[in-house]
Amino acid sequence: MGEGARRHIDATERRGRLALRHRLAAGTRAEGPEEVAGSLVALHGTDPATVHLAVGARLADAAKTVGETERALYDDGTLVRMHGMRNTVFVFPTELTAVVHASTGRTVAARERARLLKNMAEAGAPDAAWLTEVEESALAALARRGQATAAELARDEPRLKEQFAYAAGKSYEGVHTVSTRLLRVLGVEGKVVRGRPLGSWTSSQFRWAPAPEHPELDPGEAQAELLRRWLAACGPATEDDLKWWTGWRVTGVRRALTAMGAEAVSLDEGTGYVVAGDAGPVAGPGEPWAALLPALDPTAMGWQQRDWYLAPELRPALFDRSGNVGPTVWWNGRVIGGWAQRPDGEIVWRLLDAEGVGRDAETAIGAEAERLTSWVGTTRVTPRFRTPLERELSA
């Protein structure tokens, strides 16, 4: 992972790499959503609006955002929305399905299925054999339909409507429906994916679809490949960054770094890693740039250690209590404020860190706000995870 003298990569160069590789600087914007997802490895998909907003911020022609993203997700199937790292829903290139599943999904899936069976047993619900029958029937129904809601599948397989008590006697006890828990497990197992939403591109109600077929890869090789792709997009990064983003144990991170031949470099935070041959100087974009990135954007959320692009004193206004970032305003690789959409559709923003920010920056940020307004149109976007500044600006 690199021996001897290590080149130091400072915050300025890291910001320059970010601008180029995340397609945020002028001249780097993508032609289609597949390019965006490939450049970032994965887009956060927990909030459906995030996917489109993250794509739109990086397309050369933002007017194509909704149509092209829906084409890639639901018509061509070149992008897929399914569980991935940290048991979180992401959108990534379909070609990565096997890599994500083998590197991350299998371990999480085994844990999720065991938890479901344990909860059902504690509630006196039917056993594993019964669940297997229901699962096979539901998957067959989904294959016949192509895409279906949980309610539609339950009409084909009524046992999906069965309910069982959860955490009886505890403060968080409740009642779960088999369909809700089982479909989630099947999603983590890579058997089903999120399909077309029931409403617009901001809707959280969606159909299920069979997962694209993929080969079963060796977990170690898959981890090395996933880390290689991520470091190519986001490197340099520290071991803590890698552990956080992947959700793996530190031993898994170190094993993958060794397998991919990662190169060690020096960062302000300590030792960092890049893909082999990527430690040399990288010139920045040359021209100043601004961006309005959505809540949960992969650039804002990409690293655990964020001081090189986000001043610590800005975090209380821009993050919720669970660590989810809200909409952010960027200038030359630094987060300097936040934005929101008001009920009348107006995009408003506020600077929280005006150091080195002059009239040119405000003009560029205003242009990005107009660009966002032009393609969002009459659609109203409210982040799934609200943050203090976003709430204040949108009021």
Image (cartoon, grey):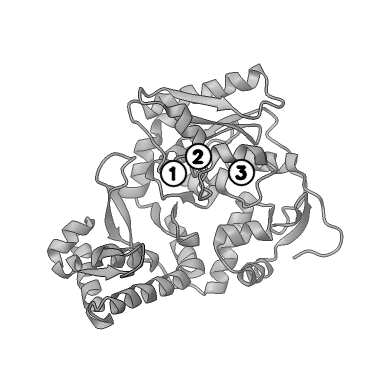
The answer to which quarter of the image holds residue 356 is top right
In the rendered structure, find residue 385 and report the number of the disc placed on it: 1
- Asked if labels 1 and 3 touch by Cβ distance under 8 angstroms, the answer is no
The answer to which quarter of the image holds residue 111 is bottom left
Considering the numbered disc 3 on the image, is that residue within a helix, a strand or a loop?
Answer: helix
Q: Which residue carries the number 3 mark?
A: 21
Q: Earlier in the sequence, mark 2 or mark 1?
A: 2
In the rendered structure, find residue 259 and report the number of the disc placed on it: none
Above or below, 125 relative to 88: below
* Kind of residue at badge 3: Arg
Above or below, 55 relative to 357: below
Q: Nearer the viewer, residue 171 or 165?
A: 171
Q: Which residue carries the number 2 mark?
A: 326
- Asked if labels 1 and 2 touch by Cβ distance under 8 angstroms, the answer is yes
Residue at 38% from the left image edge and 76% from the top image edge = 114
Image coords of residue 348 (percent x, y): 48, 24
State how far apart marks 2 and 3 are (Cα).
22 Å
